[in-house]
Image (cartoon, rainbow, N blue to C red):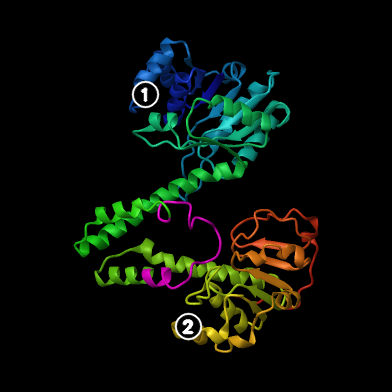
């Protein structure tokens, strides 16, 4: 396959060398005459393990060339990768001047090209950039996205020092696209690369690099804070984290990585608080660990705000324990939400098949009585009664009996705190706490009369 790569810096040079190794013909494009000359003499533009040999072999094999002529590169390739820099401003915003300039160059080159062309964004950009580039390309080319060209997002996940290995041995290859033809072309381009090929929504692909890198930064800081606590206690921090990473069922796994409601229960609040207290007693500053509880409280406030915005007084809470299949109310986050809503005058009805007030004892009883001393006035053992007598239904856990809630109770306002459904076609209003609108039914947009004024939270 013939491809062009705009930007012969770190990402572009590695991509050019690796694509050439895979047998593709690559045209590197750069405004720097020096970088163009380096590539055309068989030398890389960066210092990186294994890159010298790859560039030399590609050049000698006639699979790699470079130019400053954008029109030539576009005319002689089926895919144009954009791999120019997107530096941060002092305030943290991205400078997209270079990527927009390249888009205009590619667009102008497309004016005289008859074949369908794919523009692949390799640079790290925020959601919405792909759409903007498509608009620039349409303006500059006079052609139409989806018919004459398309734009895909294909973020890179390379580490300096191991970039060649990472490119040729990725855990996955990610392409965000709105064009099946482009997906199949990109799949063919990467067919000799191991790892799963994932085609997804454009904005999801644009978001991934930021999530990955922020999480990597979080892991480093978390490990350092654990190390500082361990050092103060004369505990082997490396042994602690080595054992931590051996747990692939919970610690290093998809478990818990699901946007939704706040955590609760008897363990996470108590033990994270104990670790924070231990650090404080050792005079160790652990801002990341300290921020965990604050972030969790913010998510509870987000739930309260979401419910209040519906403007209806009668609210049904479906699930009171901290997770499905248990009667444990200790530190259940929905209890704090209930307490707040009662204080603001909401008319609440609560259903949880696992919570039988007459059987609550010990610390479980002490906790809930301290929070909601008259709980018996709000809890019912009849789901139909709670649902039918409420205008807003708040789903707080994934009990199996809630699975057909939308079919059984049409027209309600649903507030989903746990992503109980992947897709929704509901003739009523639906909103999730930490994800966008997944309801495809047009009736969700019907205006609903509010029966209570908004209250500042």
Q: Quadrant for residue 130, please give it.
A: top right
Task: Residue 418: tell me if it is visible.
Answer: yes
Horizontal side of residue 169 vs 191, given as left or right: left
- Image vertical order of residue 440 relative to residue 432, above or below: above
- Whether the residues at callouts 2 and 1 have beta carbons within 8 Å, the answer is no
Tell me the residue that label 1 is attached to.
Answer: 51
Task: Find the magenta span and give its range.
Answer: 250-271
Task: Residue 128: tell me if it is visible.
Answer: no
- The residue furthest front is 359
Q: Measuring 57% from the left and 68% from the top, which residue is drawn there?
A: 302
Q: How crowded is mark 1: few (under 14 residues within 10 Å), some or many (20 or more)?
A: many
Quadrant containing the C terminus in the rendered view: bottom right
Residue 51 image offset from top left, x and y in percent: 37, 23
Tell me the mark number nearer the camera, choosing from 2 and 1.
Answer: 2
Tell me the residue that label 2 is attached to.
Answer: 367
Q: Quadrant for residue 415, please give it.
A: bottom right
- Magenta stretch prevailing secondary structure: loop
Q: Residues within 10 Å of mark 2 (few under 14, many from 20)?
A: some
For residue 294, the mark is none
Q: How far apart are marks 2 and 1 (CA)?
A: 62 Å
Q: Nearer the viewer, residue 435 or 113?
A: 435
Horizontal side of residue 124 vs 227, given as left or right: right
Quadrant containing the N terminus in the rendered view: top right
Q: Measuring 51% from the left and 68% from the top, which residue is drawn there?
A: 298
Residue 248 image offset from top left, x and y in percent: 40, 51
Q: Quadrant for residue 40, please give it.
A: top left
């Amino acid at each position: 396959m013939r491809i062009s790569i705009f930007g012969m810096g770190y990402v572009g040079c590695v991509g050019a060398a690796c694509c050439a190794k895979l047998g593709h013909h690559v045209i590197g494009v750069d405004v720097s005459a020096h970088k163009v000359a380096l590539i055309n003499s068989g030398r890389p533009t960066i210092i990186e393990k294994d890159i010298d040999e790859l560039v030399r072999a590609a050049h000698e094999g006639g699979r790699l060339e470079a130019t400053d002529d954008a029109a030539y590169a576009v005319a002689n390739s089926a895919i144009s990768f954009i791999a120019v820099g997107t530096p941060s401003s002092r305030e943290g915003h991205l400078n997209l001047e270079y990527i927009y300039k390249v888009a205009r160059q590619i667009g102008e080159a497309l004016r005289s090209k008859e074949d369908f062309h794919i523009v692949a964004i390799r640079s790290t950009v925020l959601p919405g950039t792909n759409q903007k580039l498509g608009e620039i390309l349409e303006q500059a080319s006079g052609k139409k996205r989806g018919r004459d060209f398309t734009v895909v997002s294909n973020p890179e996940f390379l580490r300096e020092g191991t970039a060649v290995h990472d490119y040729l041995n990725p855990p996955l290859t990610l392409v965000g696209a709105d064009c099946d033809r482009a997906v199949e072309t990109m799949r063919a381009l990467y067919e000799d690369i191991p790892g799963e090929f994932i085609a997804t929504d454009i904005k999801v692909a644009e978001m991934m690099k930021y999530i990955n890198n922020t999480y990597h930064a979080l892991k480093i800081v978390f490990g350092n804070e654990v190390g500082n606590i361990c050092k103060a206690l004369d505990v082997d921090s490396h042994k602690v984290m080595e054992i931590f990473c051996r747990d692939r069922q919970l610690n290093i796994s998809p478990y818990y990585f699901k946007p939704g409601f706040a955590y609760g229960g008897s363990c996470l609040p108590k033990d994270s608080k104990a670790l924070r207290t231990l650090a404080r007693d050792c005079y160790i500053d652990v801002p990341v660990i300290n921020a965990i509880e604050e972030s969790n409280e913010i998510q509870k406030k987000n739930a309260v705000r979401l419910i209040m915005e519906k403007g209806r007084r009668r609210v049904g809470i479906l699930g009171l324990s901290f997770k499905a299949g248990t009667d444990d109310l200790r530190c259940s986050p929905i209890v704090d939400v209930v307490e707040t809503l009662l204080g603001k005058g909401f008319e609440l009805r609560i259903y949880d098949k696992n919570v039988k007030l007459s059987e609550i004892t010990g610390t479980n009883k002490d906790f809930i009585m301290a929070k909601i001393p008259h709980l018996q006035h709000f809890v019912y053992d009849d789901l139909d009664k709670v649902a039918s007598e409420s205008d807003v239904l708040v789903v707080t856990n994934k009990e199996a009996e809630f699975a057909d809630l939308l079919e059984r109770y049409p027209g309600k306002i649903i507030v989903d705190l746990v992503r109980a459904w992947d897709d929704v076609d509901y003739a009523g209003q639906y909103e999730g706490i930490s994800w966008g609108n997944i309801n495809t039914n047009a009736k969700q947009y019907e205006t609903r009369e509010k029966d209570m004024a908004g209250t500042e939270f």
